[in-house]
Image (tube, rainbow, N blue to C red):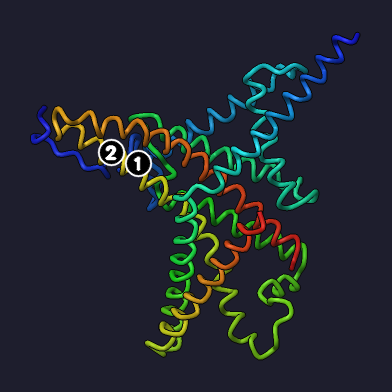
Amino acid sequence: MSSSETKHSPLEQFEIIPLIDIKSGNLDLSVTNSSISMIITVVIITLFITFSVNTRAIVPSRLQLLSELSYDFIAQLLKDTVGNEGRKYFPFVFTIFMFVLIGNMVGMIPYSFTFTSHIIVTFALAAVVFIGVTILGFIKHGFHYFSLFIIPGLPWYMLPLLIPIEVISYLSRPISLSVRLFANMLAGHTLLKVFAGFVVSLGFAGFLPLAFIVALTGLEILIAFLQAYVFAILTCLYINDALHLH
Amino acid sequence: MNNSKNKLKNLKKKIQHYEKNKTDISQNTKNSGASFGFKISTEIVATLVVGVGIGLVVDNYFETSPFGLIIFFILGAFAGLLNIYRVMRRIEKQ
């Protein structure tokens, strides 16, 4: 019990540590613990999908069933929100869903790094969705896409007030999308570490926060799944908005 | 022959039973309180951030400080309320 000697901050887990230094001009391309955990995530997804559907059995094994389940989950989601035209965008939504989900789950392993708890990562993901959806809307509708900002059935004298509001609401999409995922993961992991600190400092009564941590870890796994689901469903809704104007 | 028909019927009942339970579970996860709160709060914060950002840029460009900030802050707040209204309507539909 030497808790007073070294003080560990609950935020220490989010520190980015460069492991291999690579500098190219002004760019810092170092391999950090964040990028390592992203590579691990991508490797896990690739191995999981390729090996689980490799057998192509009619009566699937459990692993194949798992990947079929995740396929079905996203396919159903797209069908429910976008309709049949949404099938084209399945690879995009599935990739984003699996990347966020497995990234969150890799972060749940003790001593690992949660890259979704950094806003720059989630904002980059959300920006890809936002820019992609905007380009998609302009390709499908041309300049008619701007009518997205006009609520149908509105008297003309309300337009100068409501168009800026609609534009702000449209621009806030990537921010709310990224902040939601980032804040959930950051808050959950910080809470876990704070309670872990209580276990040591409370001495014998430490079994109470310890029991709480077990319950909280379960909740964190639920949130990790739920946030990936929310990210995917909002991507689907934005694609729907771009395809079908009002 | 009859036996296998009965088996099939039983299987059908079992599947229907599981299907019913499945929809119940998905309904429960959708209504999780914490995620609902996050959804609403991020909606307000995001629109306010965008509103204030646009306001500051406008002030910088046209040197109208502080009116751009004030106007776009209010517009951002309205946009947040509008977004929340839409989220609520979507939840009500489900």
Identify the amino acid type marked 2: Lys
What's the mark number on residue A189? 1
Residue A121: x and y in percent read 46, 49
Q: Residues within 10 Å of mark 2 (few under 14, many from 20)?
A: some
Protein chain holding label 1 = A
Q: Which quadrant is home to the C terminus of chain A?
A: bottom right
Along the line of sight, the residue nearer the viewer: A132 or B77: B77
Q: Residue at x 38, y 53 (%)?
A: A26
Q: Which quadrant is home to the N terminus of chain A?
A: top left
Residue A130: x and y in percent read 59, 59
Q: Residue at x 26, y 38 (%)?
A: A195
Q: Residues within 10 Å of mark 1 (few under 14, many from 20)?
A: many
Residue A128 drawn above or below residue A192: below
Q: Do the residues marked 1 and 2 share a common chain?
A: yes
What's the mark number on residue A50? none
Q: How far is mark 1 from mark 2, CA to CA?
A: 6 Å
Residue A7: x and y in percent read 14, 39
Protein chain holding label 2 = A
Along the line of sight, the residue nearer the viewer: A83 or A19: A83
When asked about the image quadrant of residue A210, the answer is top left
The image shows a total of numbered marks equal to 2
Left or right of A214? Residue A121 is: right
Along the line of sight, the residue nearer the viewer: B16 or A169: B16
Identify the amino acid type marked 1: His
Residue A197: x and y in percent read 21, 37
SS at mark 2 in the image = helix
Left or right of A214? Residue A207 is: left
Please give the residue where the numbered disc 2 appears in the rendered image. A193
SS at mark 1 in the image = helix
Q: Residue at x 44, y 44 (%)?
A: A116
Callouts 1 and 2 close, C-beta under 8 Å: yes
Left or right of A104? Residue B9 is: right
